Image (cartoon, rainbow, N blue to C red):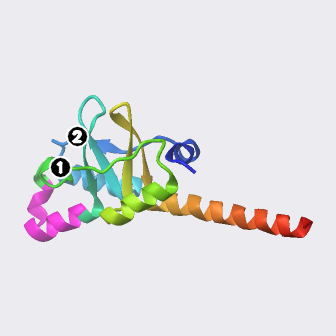
């Protein structure tokens, strides 16, 4: 299964903010939409960073609640690992495991096209394993 197939099932919607928005707005959006990360984009949809719940915890631990008035760019991860629609579930799992993160923006033609989470990847992998097991059972039953 590929990232393209995952996005066809889950959709391409992504919650984003600009790098100059306040960290407090990012916290509000994460809570309101019950998501673990926001993709930070510039005006033309180009990915310039990502901000996760973990990033916010680190910022607050280091700088206290005053950091909530700072712009997102001061705490976001600017070197964002990305994938495209042609990456496989196995490739994405490897990228996430190596980088120790749970969200991976999907880029198409240099712009944000979606986001996949470790939950999306695990769900699809479980579906694949269950389908393979059923195919094996059916094969054995007809042999």
**Which secondary structure is most common in the magenta stretch?**
helix
Chain part drawn in magenta: 55-68
Rendered location of residue 71, percent (x, y): 13, 48
User: Who's the residue at 44% across and 61% down the image?
Assistant: 93
User: Who's the residue at 50% across and 51% down the image?
Assistant: 88
Rendered location of residue 85, percent (x, y): 47, 41
Pointer 2 residue: 18
Q: Residue furthest right?
A: 142
Q: Residues within 10 Å of mark 2 (few under 14, many from 20)?
A: many
Pointer 1 residue: 72
The disc, 2 or 1, on the residue closer to the chain's N-terminal end is 2
Rendered location of residue 7, percent (x, y): 52, 44
Secondary structure found at label 2:
loop
The image quadrant that residue 42 belongs to is top left
Asked whether the residues under the numbered discs 2 and 1 touch, taking CB atoms below 8 Å apart as contact, a structural biologist would say yes
Verify whether residue 60 appears in magenta: yes
Horizontal side, residue 134 vs residue 127: left or right: right
Horizontal side, residue 136 vs residue 10: left or right: right
Work out whether 74 lies above or below 42: below
Quadrant, the C terminus: bottom right
Q: Nearer the viewer, residue 137 or 27?
A: 137
The image quadrant that residue 66 belongs to is bottom left
Q: Nearer the viewer, residue 111 or 138?
A: 138
Q: Residues within 10 Å of mark 1 (few under 14, many from 20)?
A: many
Work out whether 13 lies above or below 138: above
């Amino acid at each position: 299964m590929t990232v393209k197939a995952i996005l066809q099932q889950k959709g391409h919607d992504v919650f984003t903010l600009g790098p100059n928005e306040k960290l407090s707005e990012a916290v509000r959006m994460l809570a309101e939409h019950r998501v673990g990360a926001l993709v930070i984009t510039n005006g033309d949809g180009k990915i310039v960073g990502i901000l996760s719940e973990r990033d916010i915890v680190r910022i607050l631990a280091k700088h206290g609640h005053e950091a909530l008035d700072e712009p997102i760019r001061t705490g976001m991860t600017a070197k964002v690992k990305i994938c495209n629609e042609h990456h496989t579930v196995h490739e994405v799992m490897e990228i996430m495991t190596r980088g120790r993160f749970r969200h991976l923006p999907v880029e198409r033609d240099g712009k944000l096209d979606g986001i996949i989470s470790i939950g999306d990847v695990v769900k699809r992998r479980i579906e694949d394993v269950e389908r393979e097991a059923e195919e094996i059972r059916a094969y054995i039953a007809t042999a």
